Amino acid sequence: KSPFTGSPQEHHPPWCNMIVCHDVFDNLERLKVFVLPMVTRYPGMKILLWNYPGQAFTTFTDDAILNNKFHAECLSRLLKHVKGNGRENFNLDEPFFLLGHGSGAAIATYYSAVQRLTTLKGLVLVNGLSHVDSHYASVFHDCRNVFECSPESRPDLPIYFYARFLFSPGYLSKTSSSLALNIYTAVHNPITLRGRKRLCQGVLNHVDTRPLLKDIASPIISVHGENATLVRAFHASEYIKGRTSCPTIAQALKGGNRTAVVLMKGGHELFQERKERVALLLEQIVTGYHDKNRLPPENSTENSIVALAAVTQIVSEQTNREEFRQKGKEFEDKFFDQVIDEGREERLRSSWNVYQEQITNRQEATNQMQSQYREKEFKNENPTKLARDRADFDRNEYPEVKEYMAWRIRRHKKRLAAFDRSARIIQCALRVFMAKTMISRLKKQMAATRIQSYIRGILGRNVFKDKKKEMWAAMLVQRAIRGHKGRNISYNKRMERKAQISVARIMRGLISRRRFCAILKKREFGATKFQSTWRMSVAVDLLKYHRRRRSSSIVIQRIFRGRLGRRKADLERDKYIFSRSQNSGIELARQMVIEHKLHATKLQSEISFLDDEINKMRNQIEFTETEIKNFERNVSDLENKSHQLSKRERENFVVLKGSELNQFREEKRRMDEEF
């Protein structure tokens, strides 16, 4: 059936729309620059670009977790808001692709697994993140710490730190790091520091999408950089587990639970390092170049031709083998391989150009049918409707002329294709002739080079013999000079060693004499200390002896006085008894008793006075003993200090200078005076 039967509104273009979920710190303006040429090339194509919460020009609450689940919900609400058939709307009933880059791949995967839309033709994941592994988590932990330490006035510091994980070493070897960073930041990205911190926290809380892959009924095209340091290459293998692995993109896009992995040379930022390849791959996928219903180009010997961008999925497997083969190839083989590769690339590019021409012709035919349909409706409409639609009528449209011009353009393109094929045949013949001529010239040049190498070898061997003799003579002279110098050095070292031994012997004698004097002084000090202790012990024993003798004499005197007093008391009692017996002697007895009482009182006062004197003498003796002990302790401390001072003076006698020596002597004199 012709695709133009019926109303032109029923016809859909051969391409699909696309929704882009970019990386964590990117913005839609940067991706807009990337996809704008493709949208311009295919009028009517719609690509939805959006900044999710946390990125530039967005708002978010403080309690929101900005992970892939939250962003997928935001995308679902956004698509409900822009749903429709208008120019400014995005219709989900039409087939579309989901493009995810880095962390955006986790958002696209989660959205596809939850929504399960039937119009989703497939997912294109560029360096897609399947789960937060340890390396990815450590990178964003470091980014969060750096962002927290960065001031608001320096928004370039977070970019400098994050850019370390974006580019591959091969790309930085071709372009300097400053140039790569300038290209990366060419499009203004006013993301806030708060947004970067919240996005880092959200990325660390991403939901693992690996269990959700089985719920995605659409094909997945995983494009991964071989030298990606942010999202490593093993994430591409996660999209194959539990799904059907396909070697080509065309087989994967047949539908169902299929996955194709495309490896490219480059780092994480493939949109900058491999811009042309990625753009070509996306354009071919979106325009249906790899679909199973695509017609093969005319005069083609292959049923399906793999696109130039799809070839990169096996380049990584053949790189090492090709390098090994290139090492053993001659110049002619390399030249022929280059010619064959150029022819293969030209065939692939011609296939893609033919497909683009088919799309353009189909779109032009669609536009013609739409214009004819509008003209037919314009003629058959009643005057009321004609007047109503007069404002929409374009007077400059001439369908007959446009159809004739389209026919002429197609004819010219066919002629140009024939000329191109003829020119290609002539170029191939010319290249073969030039190659044969170059081979003969190279053979002659190689023969001359071989003869020159033989002559140079003979001359070189003669020069080598002469140089070898000169080297032997020089080595002999150098050996004699080194021997003479070595003997002189050995003699000087022996003399130095003898001098060192003599000085050491003298110093050891001096140190031994000083040590002997110190030992003698230490022994004298010990003997003096022992003698003073012995004298103190003898004096204490003598003091105790005299104290016992004095106390004993006092006791004897007290006993003797008591005995005398008792005798006197007996006599007085007898007298009293006798006087009592005598009436006349009563008064005399009373007087005698009073006298005896007075005498007893006097004796008691004397005894108390003697006791006080004894106590005072005891206190004085104890005070004297304590003072003697304190004097002995002070004397021993002064002797220790004097001994240590003398020891320091002996040990540092050589090192001490004039002022320090005077200080030692002054301190010693002061201690002698105190002693």
Image (cartoon, helix red, strand yellow):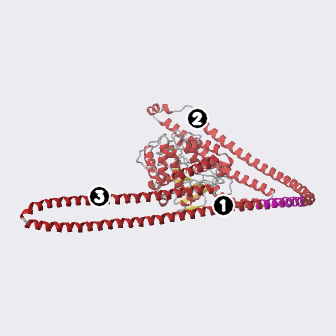
Label 3 element class: helix
Q: Main secondary structure of the magenta part?
A: helix
The residue positioned 42% from the left and 65% from the top of the image is: 540
Closer to the camera in the image, 509 or 569? 569
Let me know if residue 219 appears in the view.
no
- Magenta-highlighted residues: 474-497
Q: Nearer the viewer, mark 3 or mark 2?
A: 3
Closer to the camera in the image, 137 or 95? 137
Quarter-wise, where is residue 245 in the image?
bottom right
- The percent coordinates of residue 495 (x first, y second) are 79, 60
According to the picture, the residue beneath numbered tag 3 turns out to be 612
- The percent coordinates of residue 125 (x first, y second) are 55, 53
Query: What amino acid type is highlighted by mark number 1?
Result: Ile
Query: What amino acid type is highlighted by mark number 3?
Result: Asp
Question: What is the C-alpha distance between the residues marked 1 and 2?
Answer: 124 Å
Let me know if residue 477 appears in the view.
yes
User: Could you tell whether 627 is left or right of 521 in the image?
Assistant: left
The residue positioned 75% from the left and 54% from the top of the image is: 338
Q: Which mark is residue 398?
A: 2
Closer to the camera in the image, 439 or 507? 507
Question: What is the C-alpha distance between the residues marked 3 and 2?
Answer: 153 Å
Q: Is residue 3 above or below residue 187?
A: below
Q: Is residue 509 above or below residue 128?
A: below
Label 2 element class: loop
According to the picture, the residue beneath numbered tag 1 turns out to be 511
